Amino acid sequence: MAQEKVKVHGGRNTMPRPKLENPRQTLSRLMKFIMKYYGVQMTLVLVLILVSVLCNVQGTLFIQSLIDDYIKPLMQQNHPDFSDLLHAISRVATFYILGAIATFTYNRIMVVVTQGTLKRFRDDLFNHMESLPIKYFDTHAHGDIMSVYTNDADTLRQMISQSIPQMFSSVITVVSVVISMFYLNVPLTILNLILVFGILWVTKKLATISGSHFIAQQKDIGTVNDLLKR
């Protein structure tokens, strides 16, 4: 990865800040690191995410059945019997409860995975830094070195605990919803997909801009840490 340095007071360079050139490769290495120690937990998380998404999608699809198969027939009856409607609602409520339980469970598991991974990451990082020569610490700002253990590690925590589960959930949700939409109405589905691709294009442009600001923010945090260290 390409690197760049920032000057701080005292004439000393901050630690080189890598530019992310291969995000897919970086994500792949991170997933391999996690799966090495928490393969069973991550597999269970993926299954629970699948259960949660399918339960929520099933509840959404029930709206059509609710109107066509229950409400409209009941409106045409002089003495409506709500037992079938109540039974259907109870069934959907059960799905929502299962989805909520699955969501709660995989979030709890991800807490264990995240904290365990961060501990191993910090331990490996500390062991690596112990092997570095004294010259490295004399030529790099202490604030930037501290930032690796604090701010950068916190960014990694957010990615493991939030971004990765959300990525899995989003992929499964999109696939499930698209299949359901094509099943219900093909023309409207095509129109929605066109709009979605337009939104994704705009989002990509905004992400590029915000990414550059995030890198600048991390540099400034390292500089502030170095000033506070003195």
Image (tube, grey):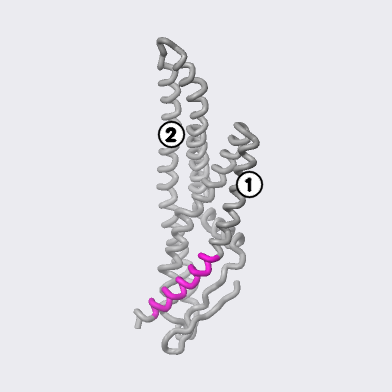
Q: Is residue 177 magenta?
A: no
Which residue carries the number 2 mark?
96
Residue furthest to the top in view is 78
In this view of the protein, which residue sits in the foreground, 86 or 223? Answer: 86
> Given the current orientation, which residue lies at the most extreme bottom position?
11
Residue at x 52% of width, y 74% of height: 17
Residue 215 highlighted magenta (yes or no): yes
Residue on which the image places disc 1: 194
**Crowd tier of the residue under label 1, counting other residues whose Cα lies within 10 Å: few below 14, some 14–19, many 20 or above:** few
- Foreground residue among 92 and 137: 92
Residue 200 visible at all? yes
Q: Position of residue 121 (x, y in %)?
A: 47, 64
Q: Secondary structure at mark 2?
A: helix
Please state which amino acid type lies under the numbered disc 2.
Tyr
| Disc 1 to disc 2: CB gap under 8 Å | no
Q: Main secondary structure of the magenta part?
A: helix
Give the camera-side residue of 60 and 228: 60
- Mark 1 and mark 2 lie on one chain; the one further toward the N terminus is 2
What residue is drawn where x is 45% and y is 89%?
11
Task: Please rate how many residues cluster around mark 2, counting C-alpha atoms within 10 Å: few if below 14, some from 14 to 19, many from 20.
Answer: many
Residue 145 appears in view: no
Q: Quadrant of the C terminus?
A: bottom left
- Where residue 14 appears, x then y in whole percent? 47, 80
Residues rendered magenta in the picture:
209-226
Looking at the rendered image, the quarter that the N terminus falls into is bottom right
- Mark 1 to mark 2 CA distance (whole Å): 30 Å
Residue 113 in percent (x, y) is at: 45, 53
Dot 1 lies on which element? helix
Give the residue at x 40% y 10%.
Answer: 79
